Amino acid sequence: MNFENYTEQQLIEYIKEAKKRLGERLIIPAHHYIRRELVELSDFTGDSYKLAVDVSRTDAEFIVFCGVRFMAESASVLSKPGQHILLPEMDAGCPMAEMIDEETATAAVEKMRNVCDNEIAPIVYMNSYADSKSFCGRNGGAVCTSSNAYKIVSYFLNRGKSVFFFPDYHLGSNVADKLGIDNSLIVRVGRDLSLEKGKNLRDAKMFLWDGFCPVHQEFTIGDVEDARSLYPDATIIVHPESDRKIVGLSDMSGSTQQILNEITESPEGAAWVVGTELTFVDRINMTFKDKTIASLRPSPCHDMVKINLYNTAVAIQSIEEYLIGKGDLKNEINVNKKLREGARAALNRMIDIVEGRDI
Ligand code: 13P
């Protein structure tokens, strides 16, 4: 079947029929930033933590992951033997994840060890590739996501360690703020490995890599001021990948799932201004017709949008053909054994800390 001339409706019909044919052998998880038409076809949605956990608990043989590459990679790392993870478009990446790699993280930690009295625990944000996660797993650290960064960082600080938090400067900075860490003990680490001047390096609590998310980097103080005057009764909720000043001026912050939960639980007539990715804000605006939901500033993710009905149908078709011996799986995500072990340890450490298991 060649989907090139298929209409949107025909692609939807194909995916629905293929899902019936494949039954429990196929699941389609979708991140909240994914296009609405795919979210409607998906088996479940979530923020990056919920997706990682939910996917790791499924026994489906084929997982067509509607999200970006680092998410599919994490699903692959946590998968069981015999499971196949497919990403509809390999080019759906993440600029922030590319702002560091294992080699650079190794050199950065070495610099910290030379100046700081405490042991350094590396904590990598989910928005990173398997080499960075593997580095953390092998060095006693953990992964974190926006929904649990506070908990993960606290876990290590409470054990007397200092933290290297990467690659998102802003999420790290927001956690440091919430923890009340003195500014002199928070050190920005430049991409040239320079350590911020004028800080107390010996006692530093958090070293923050200078990475950022281009979507959330867009929000300005002016946007918050405009939202306050346009929607005086609205609650402003933003994603913690936004600058600390934006989070400070807003009423709440949280992961995509936490944003969705807050809006779902709010009473009829509630008004919200949401500071995160545009496709998601548009979708919740259409879902909650009894509430006012406005975007802090329209800021789309140019990678999530690359996952569409067409390439999802192509990925699913490759499964159907593979099962009758007519071809290979399209865009299967595999993480090599060496990286997989460390990355798995770092992901599982996150899940254990969040779920309160004694590690
Ligand atoms: P969460 O879904 O965990 O809030 O993260 C959003 C994101 O950064 C996706 O790239």
Image: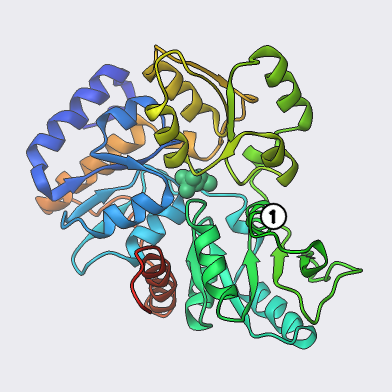
**Which residue appears at 51% of the width and 66% of the height?**
152
Outermost right residue: 198
Classed neighbour count for the residue bearing mark 1: other residues with Cα under 10 Å, few (<14), some (14–19), many (≥20) = some
Q: Position of residue 41 (x, y in %)?
A: 25, 31
Is 324 on the left or on the right of 86, as rendered?
left
Report which residue position mark 1 lands on. Answer: 177
**Which residue appears at 19% of the width and 28% of the height?**
14
Q: Position of residue 196 (x, y in %)?
A: 85, 67
Residue 91 in view, yes or no: no
Against 316, is 130 above or below? below
**Which residue appears at 49% of the width and 44% of the height?**
255
Q: Position of residue 97 (x, y in %)?
A: 58, 56
Residue 227 in view, yes or no: yes
Count of marks overlaid on the render? 1
Instruction: Tell which of 211 and 338 is nearer to you.
Output: 211
Is 290 on the left or on the right of 176, as rendered?
left
The answer to which quarter of the image holds residue 32 is top left
**Amino acid at the residue labelled 1:** Asp
For the N terminus, the image quarter is: top left
**Which residue appears at 31% of the width and 19% of the height?**
8
Against 111, is 85 above or below? above
Secondary structure beneath dot 1 equals helix
